[in-house]
Image (cartoon, rainbow, N blue to C red):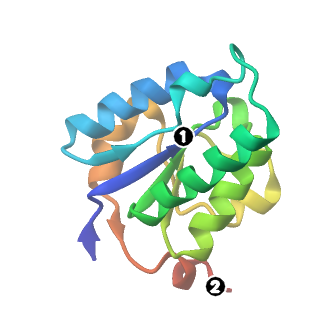
Amino acid sequence: MSALTSVTICSSSKFYDTARKAEAALRALGMTVYTPRYDYNEQLVTVDESDKARLTHEFLAKIDRSDAVFVIANDGYAGASVCIEVGYAAGQGKTILFSEQPAELALRALVDAVVPVDAITDGVRSIGHADGAARRSP
């Protein structure tokens, strides 16, 4: 099992402050970190259908380049786009990390580990990358 070297942060735009904190902690570990497009914060700007389609495909390409995804799930929340991203990552065999236990039961089936943002330094160091799909098989 090798150490994780790259991660994509998945987050609802309402949690971008938490995502930035996670990004800083992951970068401090020397990881390559891919993030949402903070400039497309849906709390501040209107994202139309063509923007959303382009951003979705751009983001899935980030997941392709990563060993893992780190999902910001404040109070267990993951929106529709984050659910799609997690499903995609799981299908690609990526390690799935959540900042908090997801409220959605289907997402819980895909979680490899819950690592609170404040515990990233210790939590992520202890996780290696193996075939995530194999670990999740019944």
Q: Is residue 20 rendered to the left or right of residue 137?
A: left
In the rendered image, the quadrant that contains the C terminus is bottom right
Label 1: how many residues lie within 10 Å, few (<14), some (14-19) or many (20+)? many
Identity of the residue drawn at 38% across and 64% down = 67
22 versus 33 height, above or below: above
In the rendered image, the quadrant that contains the N terminus is bottom left
Cα–Cα gap, marks 1 and 2: 22 Å
Identity of the residue drawn at 43% across and 25% down = 20
Identity of the residue drawn at 65% across and 27% down = 13
| Amino acid type at mark 2 | Ser
Q: Choose top left, top right, bottom left or bottom right for residue 30.
A: top left
Which residue is at the front of the view, 115 or 26? 26
Q: Choose top left, top right, bottom left or bottom right for residue 101.
A: top right
Identity of the residue drawn at 56% across and 80% down = 133
Mark number, residue 67: none
Mark number, residue 137: 2
Can residue 78 be seen in this snapshot? no
116 versus 31 height, above or below: above
Q: Is residue 17 rendered to the left or right of residue 138?
A: left
Which residue is at the front of the view, 138 or 37? 37
Q: Secondary structure at mark 1?
A: loop
46 versus 28 height, above or below: above
Per the image, the residue denoted by label 1 is 99
| Amino acid type at mark 1 | Ser
72 versus 3 height, above or below: above
Q: Which x, y percent locates residue 102?
A: 70, 46
Q: Secondary structure at mark 2?
A: loop
Which residue is at the front of the view, 105 or 37? 37
Q: Which x, y percent locates residue 83?
A: 73, 53
Name the N-terminal-most of marks 1 and 2: 1
CB of mark 1 within 8 Å of CB of mark 2?
no
